[in-house]
Image: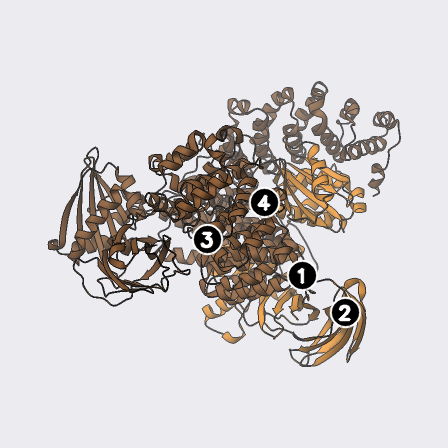
Chain colours: A orange, B brown
């Protein structure tokens, strides 16, 4: 299991060091600094083996988190744990930065003591942790409170405490999708997929039983009712640990008792019948050795009544660019030398429209034999619908012990489609 | 909230000040001081001097302070064992605290203090805590048993904690169960045979129930533990799989991977025709693909595992090529792994897409990635024959870019393409030669030299090219030196007249001026070969090269199976067994996949019997055997001074000697030479990687192949070579003797077919061979007349099996008087058919500029035995029964002293496949099948009585005429 956990700043100075196993010595701290943080080359693997000691690391802004072991640990678990550690820290004190870590080092040690025992990850749900790791001391607790804490930390529903009360029962569902595309210069879709998340904010009293339904093709086909054309084929989905997986496996129904507050209910992925909100048509022409002509057309492909926002097209330019002239019909375009790209921004754009930019790029003559690699043109945007076609059909809430019914819960649903890696080769 | 200030105190006298503060009366001040101590500890300062003062702060109601003191204790107790005792009382007291959080904290911390005296005191509180009413305390105590075991295993056993821990597996609280499982699994790892984790259907059931209820981490512990269980039968295996599959939808990737591990392992036991097996296969693909949308570090872990899964069960992801396409912003480690998997998934169906992608990648920025992409194009060419042409042209395009490392990488892979498809793409050699100067990496230089040497006869200035490399011979790496030596020798054998000087030069550089034993040895071997028996040299150096296999970098099957049992863990990331990177006893046990249930069931038939269960195994073993041989050879060649003897006097021959003797005998007769030749046939297809790794220059067949050759009893070494080389080298050859490598297909020695008297001075002798599936007629044409002969052509009369020349007779240069030329004529079996008498008679006409000559010869029927002549066991049985008994012929093979395994190996190399073996009363019955080029099947039963040199062969075939020839073939193969 995990033998130790270190946190470093960008210079490689140790901010936190917690050793769980006897086989990890102090020299491990230095080994990682010397071999990874101070290494001259780019990091070639998130797992490094130095003298029979394995180091797993993740980086958050300029902070390094490293888990160390000498055993054959479950590598996926170690990374999941490191991410979880980051989540927990963020939930406690916000952004992970050197300043915040130094300010909260006592808290971090306390957390590390709780969520990792002898290198085995323990309950790490912030909801539960916050009930007893408070930095306040726990002297004031009554006996009942204490046993409630422990039963929650170890219990079946470790993510929710009992006795939550709201005057207004309310829930928010956000369907957040990121649509990914790789298109050839000729407009052929090389790969496209949507990875989506359903994020729920629940402000519900008691221990509510929830049931979530969406236009999943398998469910709709099984029920035999409803229009099969509006259903979508989900390639795969994963759920928050509150969802009863065996029930999903057998009946494909999504039922759960939600954590309080915001959490991610599910993630899913679709590849079929994706609505690609934008199409990018590039045209790059090399005029001699010192000039490039670039023309890019973008077309929006959704209902005219909807508006896409925060549109940004990034057109890469060669390293030896000396000057750029840009003309665009809509929005603002700028050549950013530091990023080697022309960045074209459009605030809003309705569906079924098109816009165009043309640029002349002057190049410095070079004797570099190597051709410019022509990175793909990438795009960012946000649209108010789900490119996968996913629709929430219902979210039912039952709380038998308290006197509110499904109808009393105020529910909100919102769809946001964003660009993931949305690239067109040119 | 400005704890960061504690990190900044660096002034002198700090310890002294801290001491004062720790002993302050004010609680707040105390706490501040402890925080400062911990901060100093974190940055690596030694604050152990404060031990007593910090321990004094332990007795406090403030939990935060208590935790800080405990943290300090865990760090320094070991260095101050006597002082640490002071803390024991507080621990014991805390273990009785009414607050479960404090009880748990105490027992958790105590377990981390590795001081013997403290552990003694730990036992009683731990015993209580294991039975605590609060699950939080119990789950902490469960882990504490593992901690204690790590400190003092004996104590844990004596105190009976293991039994208590086992009881916790039935605890009502899922988290307690999970931690108990984790602790037991860890303890069990250091007691491999202890049966600690007594997994039985009941306990498995409990675990599966807890699986649904515990935290994500607990699920991982339980799944990892489940993976160690071996179900009793396929039914149990299926029911566990059914209960594990829901985990594939968990948001935690580690849960998913651990579930995949359990499924991959238990799947081994399910019969393949079961519906559920197919369903399960389908269910595995989506979650694996989903792992690729996780954070990059996890993607990396997932990709390394997918790499294993794709090798084990390619069908799972064969349609998912697109998800492995590289994204521009992927971290480099993800890119490289994706590329690897793309090549593994490449097939005829998706090759166009893959190639388009690879071409794209070859223009990226990262050098490693680009190199790998170029290499991948080459691997596609070798894997998917239909794409070879496109790959070659893509590679040529890339060479045109003149980007140095792209060119070098391209040349390395083109060399492999030449190996795989000889005589197909040599037109590109000219382009390659243009880039000679830009090659600065050893591998690329070596590859280019190999190409020049291999195709010396088609490159006009081959000698100049090679000579240019020779100038800096001693500055080259060993790889290049070896290759250069071989290439020049090849060149010499192909164009002896123009390159004498060159070969002398390289031989003396390699032997006299080099202190590299490998190089020297090879130099001497060539030297001796050239000087004593140049024809033999030719046979050796220019021998047919073994095929390279399509799949490269495959993990050896037993290792792969072991790694499959380690899915999700570090072993699967490193692709190494845990023993390779874990110290001590932990994890060194080798895990194995369970055997498929009912693997013995397919042998219901009484005829074949039960002992044939493993008949499918041999093919899988071949790669490892190759490795082994390679290793052996490397080993043997490595120690320099001991195996290389002082150069015998006869070796110190001058250049005159070499060339005099050499050239003469190059033209001389070739008695004795076939011996060497046939043994050079290496039956094992060498994998690409293997080929290019140890010895590019191993054109003597690659070093493994020479090993195979030397595998024959050393007595058959040509006498001259054996004697001259003397002790040291003889030893070297002897070493090969022990390695039981199947020797190549038997090729009868050349016989005289057309005496010179009958053909106006043209003498033809020859034999037939089957080399890696290609039929060849090996001819030696000797001009015994006084005038030059040219314009050779050959034709066959119609014959029983439709043999016909597959190409023209390649005699490129005119045959001068007294010159002999060896030609290998490829044959096809699609010619016109006429039944001959005897059956294997072949009438041949050879034409030259003088006249047309006719002769007839007989070919051994074994050349018609095809490589896929291995019949399915069931089919064999049915066919055997189906063929009327009248068609059965029995023969006696006398005086054969092989045991049945050796016979099997020998026969197998001639494409006589043993399908099953049965032993009755000490008599081995081998059931064998043979398929002829025209699709006729021959079934045989070979009875081998242990200790008796006489075999009984029964042959059954629908065309009974062939039986006699098959018998002859058995005789020949077994006795040679």
Q: For this rendering, which residue is in front, B15 or B540? A: B540
Figure disc tally: 4
Q: Are marks 3 and 4 in contact (CB under 8 Å)?
A: no
Report which residue position mark 3 lands on: B494
Q: Which mark is residue A386?
A: none
Q: Which mark is residue A75?
A: 4
- Seen in the picture, residue A1 relative to A214 is either above or below; the reply is above
Residue B562 is left or right of residue B123, and the answer is left
Q: Which residue lies furthest to the left in this view?
A: B886
Q: For this rendering, which residue is in front, B13 or B172? A: B13
Q: For this rendering, which residue is in front, A57 or A233? A: A57
Report which residue position mark 1 lands on: A169
Cα distance, mark 2 to mark 3? 63 Å
Q: Which of marks 2 and 4 is nearer the N terminus?
A: 4
Label 1's element?
Answer: loop
Q: Position of residue B310 (x, y in %)?
A: 48, 54
Discs 4, 1: same chain:
yes
Q: Residue at x 37, y 58 (%)?
A: B275
Cα distance, mark 4 to mark 1? 41 Å
- Which dot, 3 or 1, sits closer to the camera? 3
Q: For this rendering, which residue is in front, B326 or A153? A: B326
Q: Using the image, name the chain to which the residue with label 1 belongs.
A: A
């Amino acid at each position: 299991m995990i033998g130790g956990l270190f946190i470093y700043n960008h210079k490689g100075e140790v901010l936190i060091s917690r050793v769980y196993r006897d086989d990890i010595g102090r020299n491990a701290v230095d080994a990682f600094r010397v071999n990874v943080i101070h290494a001259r080359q780019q990091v070639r693997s998130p797992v490094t083996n130095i003298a029979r000691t394995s180091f797993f690391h993740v980086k958050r802004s300029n902070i390094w988190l490293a888990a160390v072991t000498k055993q054959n640990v479950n590598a996926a678990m170690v990374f999941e744990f490191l991410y979880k550690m980051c989540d927990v820290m963020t939930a406690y004190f916000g952004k992970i930065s050197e300043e915040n870590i130094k300010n909260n080092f006592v808290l971090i040690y306390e957390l590390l003591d709780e969520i990792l025992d002898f290198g085995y990850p323990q309950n790490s749900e912030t909801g539960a942790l916050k009930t007893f790791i408070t930095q306040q001391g726990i002297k004031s607790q009554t006996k009942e409170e204490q046993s409630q804490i422990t039963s929650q930390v170890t219990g079946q529903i470790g993510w929710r405490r009992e006795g939550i009360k709201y005057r207004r029962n309310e829930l928010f569902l956000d369907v957040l999708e990121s649509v990914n595309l790789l298109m050839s210069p000729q407009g052929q879709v090389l790969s496209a997929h949507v990875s989506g998340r359903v994020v729920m904010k629940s402000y519900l009293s008691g221990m509510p039983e929830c049931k979530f339904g969406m236009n999943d093709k398998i469910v709709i086909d099984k029920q035999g009712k409803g229009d099969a054309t509006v259903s979508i084929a989900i390639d795969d989905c994963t759920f928050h640990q509150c969802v009863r997986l065996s029930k999903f496996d057998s009946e494909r129904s999504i039922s759960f008792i939600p954590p309080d507050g915001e959490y991610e209910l599910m993630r899913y992925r679709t590849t079929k019948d994706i609505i690609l909100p934008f199409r990018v048509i590039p045209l790059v022409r090399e005029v001699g050795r010192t000039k490039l002509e670039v023309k890019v057309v973008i077309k929006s492909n959704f209902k005219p009544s909807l508006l896409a926002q925060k549109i940004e097209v990034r057109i890469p330019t060669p390293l030896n660019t000396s000057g750029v002239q840009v003309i665009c019909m809509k929005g603002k375009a700028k050549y950013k030398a530091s990023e080697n790209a022309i960045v074209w921004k459009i605030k809003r754009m309705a569906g079924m429209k098109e816009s165009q930019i043309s640029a002349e790029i002057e190049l410095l003559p070079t004797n570099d034999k190597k051709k410019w690699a022509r990175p793909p043109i990438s795009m960012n945007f946000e649209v108010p619908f789900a490119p996968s076609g996913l629709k929430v059909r219902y979210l039912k809430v039952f709380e038998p012990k308290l006197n509110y019914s499904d109808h009393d819960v105020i529910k909100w649903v919102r769809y946001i489609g964003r660009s993931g890696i949305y690239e067109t080769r040119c | 909230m400005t704890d960061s200030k504690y990190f900044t105190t660096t002034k002198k006298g700090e310890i002294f000040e801290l001491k004062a503060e720790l002993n302050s009366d004010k609680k707040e001040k105390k706490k501040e001081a402890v925080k400062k101590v911990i901060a100093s500890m974190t940055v690596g300062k030694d604050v152990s001097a404060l031990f007593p003062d910090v321990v004094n702060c332990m007795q406090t109601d403030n939990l935060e302070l208590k935790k800080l003191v405990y943290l300090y204790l865990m760090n320094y107790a070991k260095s101050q064992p006597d002082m640490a005792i002071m803390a024991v009382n507080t621990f014991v007291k805390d273990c009785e605290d009414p607050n479960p959080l404090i009880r748990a904290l105490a027992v958790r911390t105590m377990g981390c203090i590795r001081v013997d005296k403290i552990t003694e005191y730990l036992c009683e509180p731990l015993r209580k805590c294991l039975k605590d009413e609060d699950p939080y305390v119990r789950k902490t105590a469960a882990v504490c048993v593992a901690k204690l075991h790590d400190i003092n295993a004996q104590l844990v056993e004596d105190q009976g904690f293991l039994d208590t821990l086992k009881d916790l597996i039935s605890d009502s609280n899922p988290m307690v169960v999970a931690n108990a499982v984790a602790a037991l699994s860890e303890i069990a790892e250091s007691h491999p045979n202890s049966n600690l984790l007594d997994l039985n259907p009941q306990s498995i059931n409990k675990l599966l129930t807890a699986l649904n209820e515990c935290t994500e981490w607990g699920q991982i512990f339980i799944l990892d533990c489940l993976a160690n269980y071996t179900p009793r039968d396929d039914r149990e295996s299926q029911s566990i799989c059914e209960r594990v599959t829901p985990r594939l939808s968990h948001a935690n990737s580690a849960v998913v991977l651990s579930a995949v591990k359990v499924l991959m392992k238990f799947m081994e036991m399910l019969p393949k025709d079961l519906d559920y097996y197919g369903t399960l296969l389908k269910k595995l693909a989506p979650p694996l693909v989903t792992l690729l949308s996780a954070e990059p570090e996890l993607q990396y872990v997932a990709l390394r595992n997918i790499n294993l899964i794709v090798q084990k069960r390619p069908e799972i992801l064969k349609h998912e090529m697109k998800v492995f396409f590289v994204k521009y912003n992927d971290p480099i480690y993800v890119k490289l792994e994706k590329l690897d998997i793309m090549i593994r998934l490449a097939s005829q169906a998706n090759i166009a897409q893959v190639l388009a992608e690879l071409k794209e990648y070859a223009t990226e920025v990262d050098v490693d990635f680009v190199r790998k992409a170029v290499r991948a194009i080459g691997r596609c060419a070798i894997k998917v024959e239909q794409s070879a042409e496109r790959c070659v042209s893509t590679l040529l395009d890339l060479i045109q870019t003149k980007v140095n490392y792209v060119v070098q990488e391209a040349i390395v892979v083109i060399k492999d393409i030449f190996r795989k498809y000889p005589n197909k793409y040599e037109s590109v050699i000219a382009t390659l030669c243009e880039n000679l100067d830009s090659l600065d990496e050893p591998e690329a230089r070596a590859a280019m030299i190999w190409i020049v040497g291999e195709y010396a006869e088609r490159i006009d200035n081959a000698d100049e090219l090679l000579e240019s490399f020779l100038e800096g011979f001693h500055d080259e790496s060993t790889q290049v030196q070896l290759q250069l030596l071989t290439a020049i020798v090849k060149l010499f054998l192909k164009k002896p007249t123009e390159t004498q000087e060159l070969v002398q030069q390289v031989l003396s550089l390699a032997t006299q001026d080099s202190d590299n034993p490998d190089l020297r040895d090879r130099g001497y071997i060539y030297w001796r070969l050239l000087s004593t028996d140049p024809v033999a040299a030719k046979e050796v150096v220019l021998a047919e090269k073994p095929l390279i296999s399509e799949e490269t970098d495959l993990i050896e099957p037993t290792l792969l199976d072991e790694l499959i049992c380690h899915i999700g863990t570090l072993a699967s990331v490193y692709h190494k067994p845990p023993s390779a990177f874990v110290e001590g006893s932990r994890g060194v046990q080798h895990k194995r996949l369970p055997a498929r249930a009912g693997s013995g069931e397919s042998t219901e038939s009484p005829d074949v019997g039960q002992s044939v269960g493993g008949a499918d195994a041999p093919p899988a073993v071949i790669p490892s055997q190759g490795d082994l041989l390679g290793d052996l050879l490397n080993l043997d060649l490595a120690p320099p001074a001991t195996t290389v003897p002082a150069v015998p006097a006869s070796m110190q021959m001058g250049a005159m000697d070499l060339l005099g003797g050499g050239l003469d005998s190059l033209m001389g007769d070739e008695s004795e030479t076939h011996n060497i030749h046939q043994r050079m046939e290496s039956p094992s297809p060498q994998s690409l990687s293997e080929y290019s790794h140890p010895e590019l220059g191993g054109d003597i067949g690659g070093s493994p192949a020479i090993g195979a050759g030397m595998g024959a009893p050393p007595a058959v070494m040509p006498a001259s070579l054996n004697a001259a080389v003397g002790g040291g080298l003889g030893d070297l050859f002897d070493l090969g003797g022990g390695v039981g490598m199947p020797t190549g297909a038997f090729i009868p020695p050349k016989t005289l077919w057309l005496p010179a008297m009958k053909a106006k001075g043209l003498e033809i002798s020859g034999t037939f061979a089957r080399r890696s599936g290609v039929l060849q007629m090996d001819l030696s044409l000797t001009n015994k007349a006084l005038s030059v002969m040219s314009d050779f052509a050959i034709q066959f009369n119609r014959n029983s099996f439709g043999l016909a020349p597959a190409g023209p007779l390649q005699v490129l240069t005119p045959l001068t008087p007294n010159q002999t030329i060896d030609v290998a004529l490829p044959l096809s079996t699609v010619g016109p058919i006429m039944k001959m008498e005897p059956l294997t008679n072949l009438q041949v006409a050879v034409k030259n500029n003088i006249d047309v000559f006719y002769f007839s010869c007989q070919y051994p029927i074994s050349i018609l035995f095809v490589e896929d002549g291995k019949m399915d066991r069931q089919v064999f049985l049915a066919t055997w029964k189906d063929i009327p008994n009248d068609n059965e012929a029995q023969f006696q093979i006398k005086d054969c002293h092989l045991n049945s395994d050796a016979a099997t190996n020998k026969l197998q190399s001639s494409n006589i496949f043993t399908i099953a073996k049965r032993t009755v009363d000490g008599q081995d019955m081998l059931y064998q099948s043979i398929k002829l080029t025209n699709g006729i099947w021959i079934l045989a039963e070979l009875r081998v009585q242990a200790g008796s040199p006489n075999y009984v062969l029964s042959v059954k075939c629908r065309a009974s005429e062939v039986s006699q020839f098959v018998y002859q073939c058995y005789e020949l193969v077994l006795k040679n």
